[in-house]
């Protein structure tokens, strides 16, 4: 008997990026939703996260503005998806070493520091729309200097989830 498996299943990269994208849908940010999925060397999901307010800070009281003085914009308060995924991880730090992180956007310099310190060795991302900003330029320099591989993922299919 010949076993005919499906041909249209998701690759590991597509699967993990879809988990990151699905996680981003939890973000309350009206402008930018970013999800992250950390995966161990054995393709097991270690942690997920999305950008949002810190624990104990009510989202309704959170300033989601992009422009204005620092105290009244989201930038002083928001925890990025990468940060939340790293902080949400409850296992051994050893498991993060050699792990990959899948993210919607190329990480900022602050998240790059967390990625490096945690031991994650690869960043897989979809968009690099802020590549000309100083924060992303510094991020790329740090990641490269510290031996963290970066890879832009090209997905040729539209992944739809039906929650009927």
Image (cartoon, rainbow, N blue to C red):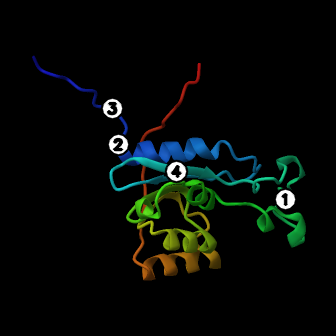
Query: Which disc number belongs to residue 47?
Result: 4
> Does the residue at mark 4 contact the one at mark 1 (Cβ under 8 Å)?
no
Q: In this view, does 5 lie to the left or right of 157?
A: left
Query: Which disc number belongs to residue 83?
Result: none
Residue 92 position, x and y percent, is 46, 59
Where on the picture, by quarter, is residue 133?
bottom right
Q: In which quarter of the image is the C terminus?
A: top right
Q: Residue at 43% of width from left, 39% of height from top?
A: 157
Tag 3: Cα neighbours inside 10 Å, few (<14), some, or many (≥20)?
Answer: few
> Does the residue at mark 2 contact the one at mark 1 (Cβ under 8 Å)?
no
Q: Viewer-proximal residue, 91 or 60? A: 91
Residue 130 position, x and y percent, is 62, 67
The Cα–Cα distance between marks 3 and 4, rounded to whole angstroms, is 26 Å
Q: Which residue is tagged 1?
A: 65
Q: Is mark 1 on a helix, strand or loop?
A: loop
Query: Which disc number belongs to residue 11?
Result: 2
Tag 2: Cα neighbours inside 10 Å, few (<14), some, or many (≥20)?
Answer: few
> Does the residue at mark 3 contact the one at mark 4 (Cβ under 8 Å)?
no
The Cα–Cα distance between marks 3 and 1, rounded to whole angstroms, is 41 Å
The Cα–Cα distance between marks 4 and 1, rounded to whole angstroms, is 28 Å
The Cα–Cα distance between marks 2 and 4, rounded to whole angstroms, is 19 Å
* Placement of 118 over or under 103, stated as above or below: below
Q: Which residue is tagged 3?
A: 8
Q: Nearer the viewer, mark 3 or mark 4?
A: 4
């Amino acid at each position: 008997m010949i076993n005919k498996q499906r041909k249209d299943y998701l690759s590991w990269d597509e699967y993990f990026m879809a988990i990151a994208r699905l996680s981003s849908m939890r973000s309350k940010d009206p402008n930018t939703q970013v999800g992250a999925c950390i995966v161990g060397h054995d393709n097991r999901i270690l942690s997920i996260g999305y950008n949002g307010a810190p624990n104990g800070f009510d989202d309704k009281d959170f300033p989601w503005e992009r422009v204005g003085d620092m105290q009244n914009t989201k930038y002083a308060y928001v925890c990025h998806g990468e940060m939340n995924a790293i902080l949400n991880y409850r296992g051994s730090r050893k498991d993060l070493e050699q792990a990959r992180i899948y993210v919607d956007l190329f990480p900022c310099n602050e998240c790059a520091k967390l990625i490096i310190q945690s031991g994650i060795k690869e960043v897989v991302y979809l968009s690099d729309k802020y590549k000309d900003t100083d924060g992303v330029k510094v991020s790329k320099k740090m990641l490269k200097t510290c031996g963290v591989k970066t890879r832009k993922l090209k997905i040729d299919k539209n992944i739809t989830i039906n929650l009927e």
